[in-house]
């Protein structure tokens, strides 16, 4: 489990680091710590939720044996990805230094 958390943190850092760079390089506003905390936590939660599915597939287990859990987990993954992409899409002008972007 510890390795999974480390991988989730690494994936989150790789995804958010370019956005932090853009904000520091081109951003006009104060540094939005809460925004980047959310952007960092969402991919981590995504990875932590996806790992059990990937392990089950690797082990040859039938994912359809537990349909309710599968639907809930896939729903969470889709929702998490949509929220992250929506935030990045909404904030990209701010990351690129567009004045009055909000």
Image: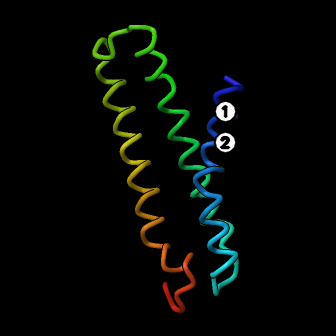
Report the label total.
Answer: 2
SS assignment at label 2: helix
Residue linked to disc 2 = 9
Q: Residue at x 60, y 50 (%)?
A: 41
x, y percent for residue 58: 45, 13
Q: Residue 75 shows which numbered tag? A: none
Say which quarter of the image contains residue 9: top right
x, y percent for residue 19: 60, 65
Q: Residue furthest bottom?
A: 99
Q: Residue at x 45, y 8 (%)?
A: 59
Q: Residue 5 shows which numbered tag? A: 1
Q: Is residue 80 above or below residue 29?
A: above
Q: Is residue 83 above or below residue 10?
A: below
Q: In this orientation, which residue lies closer to the viewer: 34 or 20?
A: 20
x, y percent for residue 72: 35, 32
Give the class, few, some or many, for how many residues have Cα within 10 Å of label 2's Cα (few <14, many ≥20): some
Q: Residue at x 49, y 22 (%)?
A: 52
Measure the C-alpha gap from mark 2 to mark 1: 6 Å
Give the class, few, some or many, for how many residues have Cα within 10 Å of label 1's Cα (few <14, many ≥20): some
Q: Residue at x 63, y 81 (%)?
A: 26
Contact flag, marks 2 and 1 (Cβ < 8 Å): yes
SS assignment at label 1: helix
């Amino acid at each position: 489990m510890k390795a999974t958390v480390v991988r989730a943190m690494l994936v989150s850092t790789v995804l958010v680091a370019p956005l932090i760079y853009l904000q520091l390089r081109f951003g006009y506003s104060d540094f939005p710590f809460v925004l980047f905390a959310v952007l960092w936590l969402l991919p981590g939660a995504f990875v932590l939720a996806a790992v059990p599915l990937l392990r089950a597939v690797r082990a040859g287990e039938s994912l359809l044996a537990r349909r309710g859990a599968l639907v809930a987990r896939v729903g969470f993954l889709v929702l998490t990805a949509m929220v992250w992409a929506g935030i990045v899409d909404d904030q990209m002008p701010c990351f690129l230094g567009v004045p009055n972007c909000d």
